[in-house]
Image (cartoon, helix red, strand yellow):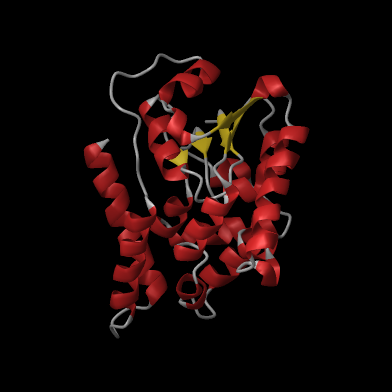
Amino acid sequence: MSLQVIGAGLGRTGTMSLKVALEQLGFRNCHHMIEVWANLPSIGDWLEAADGRPDWEKIFAGFQATVDYPGCHFWRELTAAYPKAKVLLTVRDPNDWFESTQATVFSPHMRGQMGDSPARTFVEKTVWNEFGSNIDNRDYMVKAFERHTAEVKRAIPKDRLLVFEVAQGWQPLCEFLGVPVPSKPFPRLNSRGELAAMIAATRAQGEKPDRGPVDHMAANAKEYLAQLRKVY
């Protein structure tokens, strides 16, 4: 199985909604950071990729699409490795994006709960290092978001790229991918409040002595994916 769709948009740009939307359109399955947390052994393969030794066929075995981190970190490599894949660049207001990241995936709690585990090294190499010590600096992060958007637009031919806001719904996405528009509503998932609640639950569980925070994140990710599959 080969990747048919590559998501170049950064996390917190509607990527969970897009994951489910793509799967509903027949691109099964769609990789997303939650898949890594639900399958912690895959971290080793991503660390190999981060060190310049990717095995994309192994990493994406069983997947026809990828969105969110860590795939978006490797958008240049993936678009070169899969030249026939179409590219989706999810965007949103950069200031809103910054605020969303600070309340969720880039929050001090999220950055602090992984200890010295391989999971921390993985996230550092595939997410955080892109922003360095400026991850809490609004001006820097907004410019980094804008720079990322501009670089993708500059590098990918227009006929291969869709710049997409999930609020646009099915129509532009389906036209770009050449598939029928579903009758069901476009999925709306992983809101800031929803993800913040999941993080809070992980924090509370991480205070228990039986398992560490990363193990609880993995359990929560597996449960969330199972719920998605029941609903969608």
At x 69%, y 54%, the residue is 144
Q: Is residue 97 visible?
A: yes
Asked if residue 94 lies left or right of residue 184, the reply is right
Q: 20 above or below 24? A: below
Q: Is residue 3 visible?
A: no
Asked if residue 10 lies left or right of residue 198, the reply is right
Residue lying at the far bottom of the rendered structure? 209
Give residue 109's position: percent from left, percent from top: 45, 75
At x 51%, y 45%, the residue is 13
At x 27%, y 40%, the residue is 229
Quick one: quadrant of the C terminus?
top left
For residue 194, what is the image quadrant? bottom left
Residue lying at the far right of the rendered structure? 154
Give residue 64's position: percent from left, percent from top: 50, 32
Q: 209 above or below 135? A: below
The front one of 74 and 40 is 74
Asked if residue 210 lies left or right of residue 48, the reply is left
At x 52%, y 40%, the residue is 66
Q: 14 above or below 121? A: above
Give residue 11's position: percent from left, percent from top: 53, 50
Give residue 200's position: percent from left, percent from top: 32, 70
Residue lying at the far left of the rendered structure? 230
The front one of 218 and 142 is 142
Q: 171 above or below 34? A: above
Disc tally is 0
For residue 142, what is the image quadrant? bottom right
The front one of 50 and 224 is 224
